[in-house]
Image: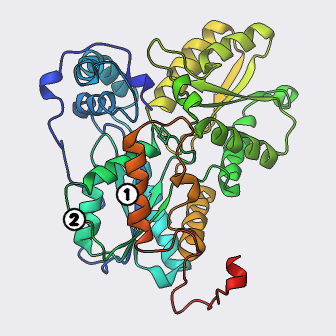
Amino acid sequence: MFSSLCRYNAPRLSRMYSAKTSATCTTRQDPNKPKPKTAIVMLNMGGPQNIDQVGDYLLRIMTDRDMIQLPMQSKLGPWIASRRTEEVQKKYLEIGGGSPILKWTNSQGMLLTESLDKCLPEFAPHKHYVAFRYVSPFTEDAFEELEKDGVERAVIFSQYPQYSCATTGSSLNAIADHYKLRPIPRHIKFSMIERWATHPLLARVFADRIREKLLAFDEEVRDDVLILFTAHSLPLKAVSRGDTYPHEVAATVANTMIELKLKNPHRLVWQSKVGPLPWLQPYTDDSIKAYAKQGRRHIILVPIAFVNEHIETLHELDIEYCHDVAKEAGVVHIERASTPNAHPTFIAALTDIVKNHLRSGPAVSKQFLTRCPHCVSQRCHKSKEFFKSLCSDSYNTQEPFVPPPNMPKVIITEASKA
Ligand code: FES
Protein backbone atom coordinates (compact mmCIF):
# COMPACT_ATOMS: atom_id res chain seq x y z
CA MET A 1 0.00 0.00 0.00
CA PHE A 2 2.25 2.84 1.05
CA SER A 3 5.35 1.62 2.80
CA SER A 4 8.02 2.20 0.25
CA LEU A 5 6.45 5.58 -0.04
CA CYS A 6 6.64 6.59 3.53
CA ARG A 7 10.02 7.10 4.97
CA TYR A 8 11.73 10.25 3.92
CA ASN A 9 11.79 14.04 3.44
CA ALA A 10 10.83 16.71 1.00
CA PRO A 11 9.34 20.15 1.14
CA ARG A 12 7.05 20.15 -1.89
CA LEU A 13 3.73 20.70 -0.19
CA SER A 14 2.96 23.78 -2.25
CA ARG A 15 2.52 21.61 -5.31
CA MET A 16 0.47 19.02 -3.53
CA TYR A 17 -3.18 18.31 -3.65
CA SER A 18 -3.39 20.33 -6.79
CA ALA A 19 -6.70 18.64 -7.40
CA LYS A 20 -6.60 16.31 -10.36
CA THR A 21 -3.15 16.56 -11.86
CA SER A 22 -4.46 15.05 -15.01
CA ALA A 23 -8.06 14.05 -14.84
CA THR A 24 -7.84 12.51 -18.28
CA CYS A 25 -8.70 8.85 -18.22
CA THR A 26 -6.52 6.82 -20.53
CA THR A 27 -9.50 4.62 -21.29
CA ARG A 28 -11.47 7.28 -23.18
CA GLN A 29 -13.92 5.97 -25.72
CA ASP A 30 -12.52 5.48 -29.21
CA PRO A 31 -15.02 7.18 -31.61
CA ASN A 32 -14.57 4.31 -34.07
CA LYS A 33 -15.65 1.73 -31.50
CA PRO A 34 -19.28 0.84 -30.81
CA LYS A 35 -20.88 2.33 -27.69
CA PRO A 36 -20.03 0.15 -24.68
CA LYS A 37 -22.86 -1.73 -23.00
CA THR A 38 -21.05 -3.12 -19.97
CA ALA A 39 -18.46 -1.22 -17.95
CA ILE A 40 -15.79 -3.09 -16.02
CA VAL A 41 -14.52 -0.64 -13.40
CA MET A 42 -11.08 -1.72 -12.22
CA LEU A 43 -10.39 -0.41 -8.71
CA ASN A 44 -6.86 -0.10 -7.42
CA MET A 45 -4.72 2.33 -5.45
CA GLY A 46 -2.67 3.39 -8.50
CA GLY A 47 0.83 4.80 -8.61
CA PRO A 48 2.50 7.98 -9.87
CA GLN A 49 3.34 7.83 -13.55
CA ASN A 50 6.07 10.42 -13.10
CA ILE A 51 7.83 12.03 -10.17
CA ASP A 52 5.74 15.21 -10.39
CA GLN A 53 2.73 13.18 -9.25
CA VAL A 54 4.47 11.76 -6.16
CA GLY A 55 3.66 14.59 -3.72
CA ASP A 56 -0.04 14.66 -4.52
CA TYR A 57 -0.19 10.87 -4.42
CA LEU A 58 1.38 10.72 -0.94
CA LEU A 59 -0.87 13.47 0.32
CA ARG A 60 -3.98 11.60 -0.77
CA ILE A 61 -2.77 8.44 0.97
CA MET A 62 -1.79 10.21 4.16
CA THR A 63 -5.12 11.99 4.45
CA ASP A 64 -7.25 8.91 3.71
CA ARG A 65 -8.54 7.69 7.07
CA ASP A 66 -9.73 4.42 5.52
CA MET A 67 -6.12 3.67 4.63
CA ILE A 68 -4.24 5.08 7.60
CA GLN A 69 -5.33 6.65 10.86
CA LEU A 70 -3.10 9.32 12.34
CA PRO A 71 -3.68 11.70 15.23
CA MET A 72 -4.57 15.20 13.91
CA GLN A 73 -4.56 13.68 10.44
CA SER A 74 -5.56 16.82 8.56
CA LYS A 75 -2.32 18.46 9.74
CA LEU A 76 0.00 15.50 10.30
CA GLY A 77 -0.91 13.73 7.05
CA PRO A 78 0.14 16.62 4.77
CA TRP A 79 3.25 17.17 6.88
CA ILE A 80 4.36 13.53 6.56
CA ALA A 81 3.58 13.53 2.83
CA SER A 82 5.63 16.67 2.38
CA ARG A 83 8.59 15.31 4.32
CA ARG A 84 8.66 12.10 2.35
CA THR A 85 8.15 13.28 -1.19
CA GLU A 86 11.75 13.77 -2.25
CA GLU A 87 12.97 10.39 -1.06
CA VAL A 88 10.01 8.62 -2.63
CA GLN A 89 10.69 10.45 -5.88
CA LYS A 90 14.24 9.02 -5.76
CA LYS A 91 12.78 5.54 -5.45
CA TYR A 92 10.58 6.07 -8.47
CA LEU A 93 13.59 7.34 -10.39
CA GLU A 94 15.40 4.10 -9.47
CA ILE A 95 12.61 2.03 -11.05
CA GLY A 96 12.49 4.05 -14.26
CA GLY A 97 10.75 7.29 -13.24
CA GLY A 98 7.23 6.07 -12.47
CA SER A 99 4.94 3.21 -11.57
CA PRO A 100 3.96 0.71 -14.28
CA ILE A 101 0.62 -0.01 -12.57
CA LEU A 102 -1.44 2.01 -15.08
CA LYS A 103 0.23 0.29 -18.02
CA TRP A 104 -0.49 -3.15 -16.55
CA THR A 105 -4.04 -2.32 -15.52
CA ASN A 106 -4.81 -1.05 -19.02
CA SER A 107 -3.29 -4.18 -20.60
CA GLN A 108 -5.30 -6.39 -18.26
CA GLY A 109 -8.46 -4.38 -18.91
CA MET A 110 -8.11 -4.54 -22.69
CA LEU A 111 -7.36 -8.26 -22.71
CA LEU A 112 -10.18 -8.92 -20.25
CA THR A 113 -12.80 -7.00 -22.24
CA GLU A 114 -11.70 -8.61 -25.52
CA SER A 115 -12.11 -11.98 -23.90
CA LEU A 116 -15.50 -11.05 -22.39
CA ASP A 117 -16.77 -9.80 -25.75
CA LYS A 118 -16.10 -13.29 -27.13
CA CYS A 119 -17.56 -15.34 -24.31
CA LEU A 120 -20.40 -13.05 -23.22
CA PRO A 121 -21.80 -11.52 -26.43
CA GLU A 122 -25.08 -10.78 -24.66
CA PHE A 123 -23.28 -8.21 -22.47
CA ALA A 124 -20.93 -6.85 -25.18
CA PRO A 125 -19.37 -4.49 -25.99
CA HIS A 126 -17.47 -4.40 -22.71
CA LYS A 127 -15.18 -1.52 -21.84
CA HIS A 128 -12.74 -1.25 -18.96
CA TYR A 129 -12.39 1.90 -16.83
CA VAL A 130 -9.33 2.35 -14.63
CA ALA A 131 -10.37 3.73 -11.24
CA PHE A 132 -7.37 4.62 -9.08
CA ARG A 133 -7.78 5.84 -5.54
CA TYR A 134 -4.79 8.14 -5.15
CA VAL A 135 -3.68 9.21 -8.63
CA SER A 136 -5.13 9.82 -12.08
CA PRO A 137 -7.19 8.21 -13.60
CA PHE A 138 -9.25 8.75 -10.45
CA THR A 139 -12.21 6.66 -9.30
CA GLU A 140 -14.63 9.59 -9.64
CA ASP A 141 -13.49 10.27 -13.22
CA ALA A 142 -14.09 6.65 -14.17
CA PHE A 143 -17.71 6.92 -13.01
CA GLU A 144 -18.24 10.22 -14.81
CA GLU A 145 -16.84 8.66 -17.94
CA LEU A 146 -18.97 5.53 -17.87
CA GLU A 147 -22.06 7.68 -17.38
CA LYS A 148 -21.08 9.81 -20.39
CA ASP A 149 -20.52 6.66 -22.43
CA GLY A 150 -24.10 5.63 -21.67
CA VAL A 151 -23.37 2.11 -20.41
CA GLU A 152 -26.29 -0.06 -19.32
CA ARG A 153 -24.51 -1.92 -16.57
CA ALA A 154 -21.35 -1.47 -14.56
CA VAL A 155 -19.36 -4.11 -12.70
CA ILE A 156 -17.26 -2.58 -9.92
CA PHE A 157 -14.30 -4.97 -9.88
CA SER A 158 -11.64 -4.66 -7.17
CA GLN A 159 -8.17 -5.47 -8.43
CA TYR A 160 -7.08 -6.41 -4.90
CA PRO A 161 -7.82 -10.16 -4.82
CA GLN A 162 -7.96 -10.13 -1.01
CA TYR A 163 -10.38 -7.70 0.62
CA SER A 164 -9.25 -5.19 3.21
CA CYS A 165 -11.24 -2.29 4.60
CA ALA A 166 -8.09 -0.19 4.01
CA THR A 167 -7.79 -0.92 0.29
CA THR A 168 -10.91 -2.12 -1.53
CA GLY A 169 -12.99 -0.66 1.32
CA SER A 170 -11.38 2.73 0.78
CA SER A 171 -12.03 2.68 -2.98
CA LEU A 172 -15.67 1.72 -2.39
CA ASN A 173 -16.06 4.52 0.14
CA ALA A 174 -14.72 6.93 -2.50
CA ILE A 175 -17.50 5.80 -4.87
CA ALA A 176 -20.11 6.32 -2.13
CA ASP A 177 -18.65 9.82 -1.50
CA HIS A 178 -18.81 10.60 -5.21
CA TYR A 179 -22.53 9.87 -5.37
CA LYS A 180 -23.25 11.94 -2.26
CA LEU A 181 -22.62 14.98 -4.44
CA ARG A 182 -24.58 14.02 -7.55
CA PRO A 183 -27.62 12.02 -8.61
CA ILE A 184 -27.22 8.27 -8.83
CA PRO A 185 -27.67 7.13 -12.44
CA ARG A 186 -30.58 4.77 -11.79
CA HIS A 187 -30.67 3.60 -15.40
CA ILE A 188 -27.32 1.82 -14.92
CA LYS A 189 -27.35 -1.62 -13.32
CA PHE A 190 -24.49 -1.71 -10.84
CA SER A 191 -22.93 -4.74 -9.21
CA MET A 192 -19.72 -5.49 -7.39
CA ILE A 193 -16.90 -8.07 -7.20
CA GLU A 194 -14.98 -7.13 -4.08
CA ARG A 195 -12.84 -10.25 -3.46
CA TRP A 196 -11.57 -13.29 -5.36
CA ALA A 197 -8.70 -14.60 -3.21
CA THR A 198 -9.59 -18.25 -3.72
CA HIS A 199 -10.21 -18.35 -7.45
CA PRO A 200 -8.41 -21.50 -8.71
CA LEU A 201 -6.88 -19.74 -11.73
CA LEU A 202 -5.34 -17.10 -9.47
CA ALA A 203 -3.53 -19.89 -7.59
CA ARG A 204 -2.46 -21.35 -10.93
CA VAL A 205 -0.87 -18.08 -12.05
CA PHE A 206 1.09 -17.75 -8.83
CA ALA A 207 2.17 -21.39 -9.11
CA ASP A 208 3.38 -20.75 -12.69
CA ARG A 209 5.27 -17.65 -11.57
CA ILE A 210 6.99 -19.70 -8.83
CA ARG A 211 7.89 -22.54 -11.20
CA GLU A 212 9.49 -20.03 -13.61
CA LYS A 213 11.82 -18.87 -10.84
CA LEU A 214 12.54 -22.33 -9.41
CA LEU A 215 14.21 -23.19 -12.72
CA ALA A 216 16.84 -20.55 -11.97
CA PHE A 217 18.13 -22.60 -8.98
CA ASP A 218 20.65 -25.44 -9.19
CA GLU A 219 18.90 -28.77 -9.45
CA GLU A 220 20.58 -30.04 -6.25
CA VAL A 221 18.92 -27.34 -4.13
CA ARG A 222 15.68 -26.81 -6.07
CA ASP A 223 13.49 -29.00 -3.83
CA ASP A 224 14.68 -27.18 -0.73
CA VAL A 225 14.22 -23.61 -1.92
CA LEU A 226 12.19 -21.75 0.68
CA ILE A 227 9.06 -20.13 -0.78
CA LEU A 228 8.42 -16.91 1.12
CA PHE A 229 5.02 -15.51 0.25
CA THR A 230 5.00 -11.81 1.02
CA ALA A 231 2.05 -9.43 1.32
CA HIS A 232 1.59 -5.88 2.51
CA SER A 233 1.23 -5.87 6.28
CA LEU A 234 -1.68 -4.38 8.20
CA PRO A 235 -1.79 -2.56 11.57
CA LEU A 236 -2.69 -5.00 14.36
CA LYS A 237 -5.48 -2.60 15.28
CA ALA A 238 -7.16 -3.38 11.95
CA VAL A 239 -6.53 -7.12 12.40
CA SER A 240 -8.14 -7.01 15.84
CA ARG A 241 -11.09 -5.13 14.43
CA GLY A 242 -11.72 -8.17 12.26
CA ASP A 243 -10.38 -7.16 8.84
CA THR A 244 -10.59 -10.27 6.61
CA TYR A 245 -7.36 -9.52 4.71
CA PRO A 246 -4.96 -11.78 6.69
CA HIS A 247 -7.06 -14.91 6.31
CA GLU A 248 -7.85 -14.17 2.67
CA VAL A 249 -4.14 -13.79 1.89
CA ALA A 250 -3.49 -17.07 3.74
CA ALA A 251 -6.19 -18.74 1.63
CA THR A 252 -4.46 -17.66 -1.61
CA VAL A 253 -1.17 -19.02 -0.24
CA ALA A 254 -2.74 -22.37 0.67
CA ASN A 255 -4.39 -22.69 -2.76
CA THR A 256 -1.13 -21.83 -4.51
CA MET A 257 0.78 -24.51 -2.60
CA ILE A 258 -1.91 -27.09 -3.45
CA GLU A 259 -1.70 -26.05 -7.12
CA LEU A 260 2.11 -26.18 -7.04
CA LYS A 261 2.17 -29.83 -5.88
CA LEU A 262 5.71 -29.44 -4.57
CA LYS A 263 7.19 -30.29 -1.21
CA ASN A 264 9.18 -27.09 -0.81
CA PRO A 265 8.81 -25.40 2.58
CA HIS A 266 6.86 -22.15 2.60
CA ARG A 267 5.87 -19.31 4.92
CA LEU A 268 3.72 -16.19 4.71
CA VAL A 269 5.48 -13.01 5.80
CA TRP A 270 4.53 -9.35 5.72
CA GLN A 271 6.22 -6.33 4.20
CA SER A 272 5.96 -2.55 4.17
CA LYS A 273 5.18 -1.70 7.77
CA VAL A 274 4.92 2.04 8.45
CA GLY A 275 5.16 4.06 11.66
CA PRO A 276 5.68 3.09 15.29
CA LEU A 277 2.48 1.09 15.98
CA PRO A 278 2.51 -2.74 15.89
CA TRP A 279 1.71 -4.41 12.55
CA LEU A 280 1.19 -7.97 11.42
CA GLN A 281 4.48 -9.95 11.57
CA PRO A 282 6.92 -11.57 10.79
CA TYR A 283 8.30 -8.93 8.45
CA THR A 284 9.75 -9.98 5.12
CA ASP A 285 13.19 -8.40 5.58
CA ASP A 286 13.55 -9.78 9.13
CA SER A 287 12.51 -13.21 7.88
CA ILE A 288 15.16 -13.22 5.14
CA LYS A 289 17.81 -12.37 7.74
CA ALA A 290 16.54 -14.91 10.28
CA TYR A 291 16.32 -17.73 7.72
CA ALA A 292 19.81 -16.96 6.47
CA LYS A 293 21.03 -17.38 10.06
CA GLN A 294 19.20 -20.72 10.25
CA GLY A 295 21.05 -21.82 7.10
CA ARG A 296 18.13 -21.38 4.68
CA ARG A 297 20.01 -19.53 1.95
CA HIS A 298 17.97 -20.32 -1.18
CA ILE A 299 14.78 -18.30 -1.27
CA ILE A 300 12.00 -17.23 -3.64
CA LEU A 301 9.96 -14.18 -2.68
CA VAL A 302 6.39 -14.33 -3.97
CA PRO A 303 4.28 -11.16 -3.82
CA ILE A 304 0.93 -12.83 -3.25
CA ALA A 305 -1.34 -9.82 -2.85
CA PHE A 306 -0.22 -7.67 -5.80
CA VAL A 307 -1.43 -8.35 -9.34
CA ASN A 308 0.83 -5.76 -10.98
CA GLU A 309 4.41 -4.73 -10.66
CA HIS A 310 4.78 -1.49 -8.76
CA ILE A 311 7.01 0.21 -6.23
CA GLU A 312 6.56 -2.46 -3.52
CA THR A 313 7.78 -5.18 -5.88
CA LEU A 314 10.25 -3.31 -8.07
CA HIS A 315 11.89 -1.30 -5.31
CA GLU A 316 11.13 -2.80 -1.91
CA LEU A 317 11.44 -6.45 -2.93
CA ASP A 318 13.91 -6.28 -5.82
CA ILE A 319 16.27 -3.54 -4.70
CA GLU A 320 15.94 -3.38 -0.91
CA TYR A 321 15.33 -7.04 -0.01
CA CYS A 322 16.69 -9.19 -2.86
CA HIS A 323 19.75 -7.05 -3.29
CA ASP A 324 20.62 -5.15 -0.10
CA VAL A 325 19.09 -7.26 2.70
CA ALA A 326 19.83 -10.68 1.16
CA LYS A 327 23.41 -9.77 0.35
CA GLU A 328 24.11 -8.52 3.84
CA ALA A 329 22.44 -11.58 5.39
CA GLY A 330 24.58 -14.00 3.34
CA VAL A 331 21.77 -15.46 1.23
CA VAL A 332 23.32 -17.58 -1.54
CA HIS A 333 20.52 -17.31 -4.12
CA ILE A 334 17.30 -15.32 -3.98
CA GLU A 335 14.72 -14.79 -6.72
CA ARG A 336 11.50 -12.81 -6.82
CA ALA A 337 8.47 -14.25 -8.62
CA SER A 338 6.81 -11.87 -11.09
CA THR A 339 3.36 -10.53 -10.37
CA PRO A 340 0.54 -11.85 -12.64
CA ASN A 341 0.62 -8.79 -15.00
CA ALA A 342 -0.71 -9.97 -18.40
CA HIS A 343 -0.11 -13.72 -17.90
CA PRO A 344 -2.73 -15.53 -20.07
CA THR A 345 -3.90 -17.60 -17.10
CA PHE A 346 -4.44 -14.40 -15.15
CA ILE A 347 -6.55 -12.93 -17.94
CA ALA A 348 -8.49 -16.22 -17.98
CA ALA A 349 -8.99 -15.85 -14.21
CA LEU A 350 -10.31 -12.29 -14.55
CA THR A 351 -12.59 -13.39 -17.41
CA ASP A 352 -13.96 -16.32 -15.43
CA ILE A 353 -14.63 -14.15 -12.37
CA VAL A 354 -16.53 -11.49 -14.34
CA LYS A 355 -18.34 -14.06 -16.50
CA ASN A 356 -19.64 -15.98 -13.47
CA HIS A 357 -20.57 -12.74 -11.77
CA LEU A 358 -22.55 -11.39 -14.73
CA ARG A 359 -24.30 -14.68 -15.33
CA SER A 360 -25.16 -15.77 -11.83
CA GLY A 361 -23.44 -13.77 -9.11
CA PRO A 362 -25.22 -11.68 -6.51
CA ALA A 363 -25.08 -7.95 -7.29
CA VAL A 364 -23.47 -7.39 -3.91
CA SER A 365 -22.26 -10.16 -1.62
CA LYS A 366 -23.44 -10.79 1.92
CA GLN A 367 -19.78 -11.04 2.84
CA PHE A 368 -19.29 -7.40 1.79
CA LEU A 369 -22.44 -6.24 3.54
CA THR A 370 -21.21 -7.70 6.84
CA ARG A 371 -19.03 -5.29 8.79
CA CYS A 372 -15.95 -6.20 10.82
CA PRO A 373 -17.10 -7.36 14.28
CA HIS A 374 -15.42 -4.41 15.99
CA CYS A 375 -16.08 -1.79 13.31
CA VAL A 376 -17.36 1.43 14.86
CA SER A 377 -17.06 3.53 11.71
CA GLN A 378 -20.25 5.25 10.61
CA ARG A 379 -18.53 5.73 7.25
CA CYS A 380 -18.32 1.93 6.78
CA HIS A 381 -21.92 1.54 7.87
CA LYS A 382 -23.20 4.22 5.47
CA SER A 383 -21.08 2.98 2.61
CA LYS A 384 -22.44 -0.57 2.93
CA GLU A 385 -25.98 0.77 3.04
CA PHE A 386 -25.21 2.83 -0.07
CA PHE A 387 -23.98 -0.21 -2.05
CA LYS A 388 -26.88 -2.33 -0.84
CA SER A 389 -29.20 0.27 -2.32
CA LEU A 390 -27.10 1.01 -5.44
CA CYS A 391 -26.79 -2.63 -6.41
CA SER A 392 -30.14 -3.94 -5.23
CA ASP A 393 -31.94 -1.31 -7.32
CA SER A 394 -30.59 -3.29 -10.24
CA TYR A 395 -30.60 -6.81 -8.87
CA ASN A 396 -31.97 -8.68 -5.91
CA THR A 397 -29.10 -9.21 -3.45
CA GLN A 398 -30.72 -12.29 -1.97
CA GLU A 399 -31.51 -14.24 -5.12
CA PRO A 400 -29.46 -15.29 -8.14
CA PHE A 401 -29.23 -12.77 -10.96
CA VAL A 402 -32.05 -13.24 -13.51
CA PRO A 403 -30.41 -14.14 -16.84
CA PRO A 404 -31.04 -12.07 -19.99
CA PRO A 405 -33.62 -13.39 -22.49
CA ASN A 406 -31.10 -15.07 -24.80
CA MET A 407 -29.77 -17.27 -21.99
CA PRO A 408 -31.40 -20.55 -20.93
CA LYS A 409 -34.39 -19.80 -18.70
CA VAL A 410 -34.22 -20.71 -15.02
CA ILE A 411 -37.52 -21.17 -13.24
CA ILE A 412 -37.28 -19.99 -9.64
CA THR A 413 -39.82 -21.85 -7.55
CA GLU A 414 -40.59 -21.46 -3.85
CA ALA A 415 -38.86 -24.80 -3.30
CA SER A 416 -35.69 -23.72 -5.07
CA LYS A 417 -35.63 -20.49 -3.03
CA ALA A 418 -35.60 -22.57 0.12
FE1 FES B 1 -14.11 -3.17 8.50
FE2 FES B 1 -15.59 -0.98 9.15
S1 FES B 1 -13.47 -1.38 9.58
S2 FES B 1 -16.21 -2.79 8.07
10 Å crowding of disc 1: few (<14), some (14-19), many (20+)? some
Exactly how many numbered labels are in the figure? 2
Instruction: State the image coordinates of residue 293 (x, y, percent, origin top left).
Output: 75, 7
10 Å crowding of disc 2: few (<14), some (14-19), many (20+)? few
Q: Identify the residue under disc 1.
A: 386
User: Can the viewer see residue 124?
Assistant: yes
Q: Does any atom of ligand 1 lie closer than 8 Å to the CB of label 1? A: no
Q: Is residue 126 above or below residue 346?
A: below
Q: Identify the residue under disc 2.
A: 183
CA separation in Å, label 2 and label 1: 13 Å
Instruction: State the image coordinates of residue 81 (x, y, percent, origin top left).
Output: 28, 22
Position of the N terminus, as image quadrant, is top left
Q: Does any atom of ligand 1 lie closer than 8 Å to the CB of label 2? A: no
Q: Is residue 363 above or below residue 345?
A: below
Residue type, mark 1 in image: Phe
Instruction: State the image coordinates of residue 166 (x, y, percent, origin top left).
Output: 45, 37
Position of the C terminus, as image quadrant, is bottom right
Q: Secondary structure at mark 1?
A: helix
The residue located at (65%, 52%) in the rendering is: 202
Nearer to me, 339 or 369 = 369
Instruction: State the image coordinates of residue 64 (x, y, percent, origin top left).
Output: 33, 33
Residue type, mark 2 in image: Pro
Q: Secondary structure at mark 2?
A: loop
User: Can the viewer see residue 172?
Assistant: no
Nearer to me, 150 or 28 = 150
The residue located at (65%, 19%) in the rendering is: 282
Nearer to me, 49 or 162 = 162
**Quarter of the image where one finds residue 142:** bottom left
Determine the residue located farthest toward the left in the rendered image: 14
The label on residue 25 is none
**Quarter of the image where one finds residue 14:** top left
**Mark with earlier residue (2, 1):** 2
